[in-house]
Image (tube, grey):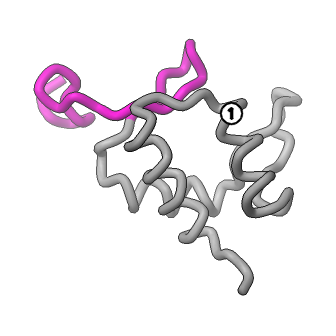
């Protein structure tokens, strides 16, 4: 059975929820190992990135419960008490 973007996205949410914080480089390696290189591309910066279709499904799947930390290039589980979702008054 071939994986879909939604399958990869749901798996990403599970991993980040379990680990609480995952570096992009680690996620890229894990996606490639588990699902294959079709879900990875090289972005304009020259760095490997998660496929855009996967990221679209990922945003739907986590429903604001996971945040991206640009400087660390990592996803982390949001603490909604101190890290409200965008549009929640901040």
Residue 77 falls left or right of residue 42: left
Q: Position of residue 86 (x, y in %)?
A: 26, 34
Residue 44 falls left or right of residue 26: right
Residue occupying the far bottom of the picture: 1
Q: Residue at x 18, y 23 (%)?
A: 90
Question: Along the line of sight, which residue is nearer the eye, 13 or 82?
Answer: 13
Q: Position of residue 70 (x, y in %)?
A: 54, 20
**Which part of the image, by quadrant, shows the N terminus?**
bottom right
Q: Residue at x 60, y 63 (%)?
A: 8
> Most prominent secondary structure in the magenta stretch?
loop
Residue 81 falls left or right of residue 61: left
Assign a secondary structure to mark 1. helix
**Number of residue marks:** 1
Instruction: Write down the residue under mark 1.
Output: 26
Question: Along the line of sight, which residue is nearer the eye, 11 or 70?
Answer: 11
76 to 53, vertically: above or below: above
Residue occupying the far top of the picture: 71
75 to 33, vertically: above or below: above
79 to 17, vertically: above or below: above
74 to 3, vertically: above or below: above
Q: Is residue 5 shown in magenta?
A: no
Q: Residue at x 55, y 26 (%)?
A: 74
Q: Residue at x 73, y 81 (%)?
A: 2
Q: Position of residue 48 (x, y in %)?
A: 81, 37
Q: Residues within 10 Å of mark 1 (few under 14, many from 20)?
A: few
Q: Position of residue 29 (x, y in %)?
A: 76, 41
Identify the magenta region.
67-90
């Amino acid at each position: 059975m071939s994986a879909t973007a939604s399958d990869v996205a749901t798996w990403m949410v599970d991993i980040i929820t379990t680990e609480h914080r995952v570096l992009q480089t680690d996620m890229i390696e894990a996606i490639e190992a588990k699902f294959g290189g079709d879900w990875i591309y090289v972005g304009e910066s020259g760095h490997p990135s998660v496929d855009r279709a996967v990221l679209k499904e990922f945003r739907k799947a986590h429903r604001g419960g996971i945040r991206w930390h640009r400087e660390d290039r990592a996803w982390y589980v949001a603490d909604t008490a101190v890290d409200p979702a965008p549009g929640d008054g901040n």
